[in-house]
Image: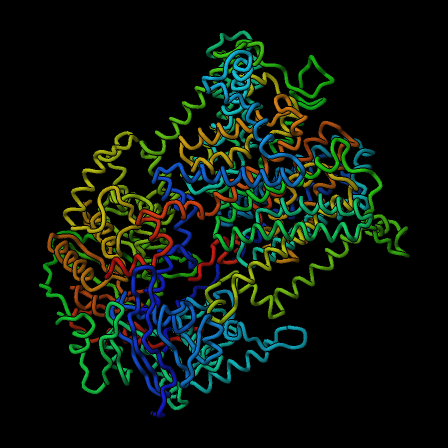
Amino acid sequence: MSTLEEEEQERDEVAGANEGAAAALTTPARLGAYMRRGTVTVPILTTLIAFIAGGFVVLLTGHNPFSTYKAIFNGTGLQWLFPWVTGSARSTAAFNLQQTLLATTPLILVGLAVAFAFRAGLFNIGGQGQYTVGGIAAVWIGSSFSSMPAFPHIVLAIAGAALAGAAWAGIAGALKATLGVNEVISTIMLNWIAIWGGVWLFGLGGPLQDPHQSSVPTSSPVAASAKLPVFWGNASLQGLDIGLFIALGAAVVFWVLLNRTRFGFEVRAVGLNPDAASYAGISVARSYFRVMAICGAFAGIAAAMDILGWKFSLFTNDIQFSTVGFIGIAVALLGRNSAVGVVFAALLFGALETGTSDRYLDPSVFDPNLASNLTWMIQGLIVLLVSTDVIALKVLSSGRGIRVLFKGRAKREEASA
Amino acid sequence: MADSARPALELRGITKKFGSVVANDRVDFDVYPGEVHALLGENGAGKSTLMSVLYGLYRPTDGEIMVDGQQVEIDSPARAIALGIGMVHQHFMLVPVMTVAENLVLGNEPTQAGGVLDLDAARTRVNELSARYGLAVDPDATIEDVTVGTQQRVEILRALYRGARILVTAQEVEDLMAVLGRLKEDGTGIVFISHKLGEVLLVADRITVLRRGKKIDTVRRAGATEQSLARLVVGRDVLLSVEKTPGHPDRASEPMLDVEDLHVRDDRDLEAVNGASLSVMGGEIVAIAGVDGNGQQELVEAITGLRTPTEGRITVAGEDVTGKGVNAATDAGVAHIPEDRQRRGLVLPFTLAENLALREYRRPYFSKGGWWRVRHIRERAFKLLGEYDVRGGDCDTFASALSGGNQQKVAIAREISCDPKLLVAHQPTRGLDVGAIEFVHRRLIEERDKGRGILLVSLEYDEVRALADRILVIYEGAIVGEFAPDASEEELGIAMTGGQKAPEATPA
Amino acid sequence: MSVGTLAISPPRTASPKLIGIAGLVLSVVAWVITLPPFLVRTPVPSILIGVAAMSAGAYAFVNDERRIGFGAFALGTLAIAGAIGNTNSGVGHLKVVFTWSILVAAMLRYATPLLWAALGGIICERSGVINIALEGMMLMGAYFGIWGADVFGSWVIGVLIAIVAGGLLALVHAIFSIHLRANQVVSGTGINFLALGITGYFFIAHYGDNGTPSGISQVPNVKIPGIQHVGFFGNAIGDANLLTWIAILLVPALSFFLFRTRWGLRLRAVGEKPRAADTVGLSVIRTRYLAVVASGMLAALGGAYLSVAFVGSFNQNMTEGRGFIALAAVIFGKWRPAGALMATLLFGFASALADRLPTFSQSLGTLFQALPYLLTLVAVAGIVGRSRPPASIGIPYVKE
């Protein structure tokens, strides 16, 4: 081995450049490296930039970005947090906030489903399919067994949804583990298979269509015993149910699993350096399978929260046009794949969803259809910005670790000097 | 040896800074046509930076480059090539899935009308050059199927194809020798980069020594010795080999490692280990020497449980671990210091504490019942970091922040601390500087003297001769000879290139 | 003094692989014999053949030909299911659904957008950049193509605008992936979101609730004189769209470009080992930029076909995952144009079939919409084998 080659190789390796060594510095590795710095500046900056860019688009089509964003904000209900808001404005805000939190709940869970995969070095784009399958299970269990008492019925439905989601994701995991199938392709395909499967199940003439509503492509409604109890707001007017706490609990489980269990250590090692992990005796393939299954479980529970919390039945339209799984990707990325980050990112996107929906956005200010597309653009920009480390790099100019990752040469000279 | 009045290439006062780090500090260097001028220095001395500047990969912060007396700006490899500067890398710089001919002409392809590739013309060119310089290559062979030696030859030919009049090379000496005579006749100036004193003394006409970015001196070959050069390189008198007491292998007990007739296939399903047998007793260091690519990697992987052999048996201290996986090997007492510490040994974005737990994390001390015991892990890490004098960080520092030598210390600390019966060290000092190498060598000998069996796989003659109690030569997947540590380089060399057996007709 | 190569043992006998392939063929046979014109009316022979196929697959799987084995096994299962379904349907129904000439015509229609996108994907990935964003680029082409055709009254301009739109979006992907060294799968996903938002936004802003008007200028079909009314061929290919023909002709052209010209050689070198290309003076960055933008333009053409040639209108998220099927076709076809053609024809056939089935059962028709995706999954998992992407794919090139 010549010196030149050795030096070059070292430089390459440390600089995270090509020659395969870069494979060891995967995105989770890079994200992980500055995630631990614990800064919140980067996600905030990223969001700000995305919103500003979105504002430009709004301006382009002849609307006022400020009033648009204000109108969206008004719909979110977040102003309830401001103590100076009182009276009827306050009660409207309360109701809106409940809706926001209702939207946030599944987003937390799906975000966790994507984030957990990322931590293992996997890209779970299949959140939507796993969510769909979980929803099918939840609605079926929820609408059957109506003589069961509430608590076991709810638990059964949630467990069934988790299992269904885990199995669905497990297919992709198993394919990756045994055949090395790229999980991006397999989960995307599984998404569509799940969606069309669901549409068939509850469609006209489908096997699980509500027998009492033969002209409507929907499932049977969830029994009263399976509905999640509401703790804030009016139950008959779609108040906030305890699903929020289940979601937050899931975030805690996520953190504990990753940071306080042996399994979590293995997952993190595999995500940051699969080669070194296998050299340490960790079975990378088995980890992939287990991780995907857990992700599917999170996504399945997300669906259960929606079904048992406020949807109470599943229309084929819901299945076909739901986008929760994809927003989950943006949530995970913005939240830097950490439990806390995911919760806050979910809140942001939940707020956006409520604020731009046609029930709460004043169409005279901004067309809700436009607004939902605006949200997609903002999400797209956020994901794009997160995919590079540009902002992160600029903000986090401190920390030897980062500099080593990207300016290996300098580090190397310094260290050996 | 042609000797014109004017240098073909001259670097004057070249300075290159990366932020506050000065990689090259006002370096002067020149090459005359037909001479071999060696650039000598330790890793990190600035040799490769200087050459990258020359090749247009970096812009110098200060200084000038003159080619044939004219000042030039080299802002890209294309420009360097146009100026007649050819850089010869090793197989790194060839496209593995393409043929020799395709690689040779890449970027400068002979074409028929409309950009259609003229592969026949390419083949002809290859054969012409090959004959002229005495470097036999098959134009239609695919790079990934061809030997390392042939790849080196292709690299040289590629630079010559582009009309290089100044050749910058960091090649191993053997191949260069073959072509050297011809090149000097042609008046090509050659820059030879190395950190190996012996090599440099063999080929160079003049030798320039770099240390910490500065040029220390330029000397003529006549009168230079290994000692005099070493003094220039390191700045003090250097002990060229570590003192070693002979080992006391424990022949009474069963061997720490016993490998019987092992057959292992590599990633491309070709047989890489072809009936290898060896054993390592406690208290001895057995080194496996051989040219890279003769099955060392797969042998190590089989022993450490990463690869399942197709035939044969591996026993560690009496326990059969053949094909049972890494965890079984670890439980039987195998520790492994892998070849590529950054990619396989450590998880760079993990903290030192987490890295130190990698080998033994399944033990109840670290993770009882699946629960991750953070406190114990940190305690253990703290202890090990002190014991092995790891500089540059504490338990919570990321491994990426450490220097190469300290990273290797961490890897070694981890492996030794699990009290192995067999320690497999694969290229443990690759890329390390002299001080770190000394540490590793000393430590290996210490561990040997504690009764462990150590299997060392290394590509460095000096390391093998310095450490081994017994030297096994591997060639084409089998152990072809056993030597004492005082065997001559020649003997080892012959065995390593298959000289002991009558060579069969092998595909090129 | 040469070092001999490693002793290369004789290659393993090919039998597990051959048996696996035989299993694949048997699966197809098992299914086809229940279709017109053979119309075997009992499922028994199909079941037997199908089981043979599954066994062949299992044998291959156990003998380390895992992927082909899995493929044969899965296909065998599907074939038996399909055969049972066929034999339980009326002959009349089968004949309606399996009118082969109409099926072939439909197959071409469904394959065209996939083929355009796949060809673009091949160029992009061959240069070393992963392109998950084919979907988004197609969508841009679909919307801006029809918008252009509408506003300027000409499908030519519509197609041209589609190309520009796709190219611009691809430029964004290129900047993020190449210049900013992003994780290319993530940035591709972001591009897809962005495209969804942009096309939806401008669609609503411009067309409001009514959607695109009818009667927009469409890309014409190519009526081949002479065979146009001749039986099978007439129906099958006599009236295919211009963009279909161009795409098909592009296949050998791209093949030639990639493997027989100097630029193709350079493109492939950049994708395999950018360092090597760099050291001979090629610009890795520029090559990749060109490749990514080219892929955007081609994918956009695929999307434009959907709106301007096929359907004649636009609706939000019109592409519905086709871009991903195109990516699967790239992988399935081992990054070769001819392979991608085979793959897209196969997937197109599945879609065509799914389309004809509602005539026979409304509910089942919905289920069969999943068929192309299922087939893609099986294909990528089972049959692709040890296919190698360009070696440096997805790894950003760093040049200091």
Q: Is residue B192 left or right of residue B126?
A: left
Q: Position of residue B321 (x, y in %)?
A: 28, 47
Q: Can residue B246 be seen in this view?
A: yes
Along the line of sight, the residue nearer the viewer: C340 or B236:
B236
Quick one: C119 or B38, which is closer to the camera?
A: B38
The C terminus of chain C lies in which quarter of the figure?
Answer: bottom left
Note whether C144 is above or below A219 in the view shown: below
In the rendered view, does A301 fall on the left or right side of B502? right
Relative to B307, A197 lies left or right? right
Label count reads 0
Question: Nearest the camera: C389 or A244?
Answer: A244
What residue lies at 34% left-to-right and 92% top-to-bottom?
Answer: B3
Residue C250: name its quadrant.
bottom right
Can the viewer see residue B277?
A: no
Tell which of A287 and B95 is nearer to you: B95
Q: Quadrant of the N terminus of chain C?
A: bottom left
Q: Where's residue B198, x and y in %?
A: 23, 77
Q: Which residue is drawn at 19% across and 77% down?
A: B229
Residue positioned 55% across, 46% down in the render: C188
Judge whether A264 appears above or below B89 on screen. above
Instruction: Point out residue B168 in the picture as x, y percentages from the top left corner.
Output: 38, 77
Using the image, determine if residue A132 lies above or below residue A25: above
Q: Residue at x 53, y 46 (%)?
A: C187
Could you tell me residue C183's position as x and y percent? 48, 48
Classify residue C366 as left or right of residue C330.
right
Q: Residue B84, relative to residue C377: is it above or below? A: below
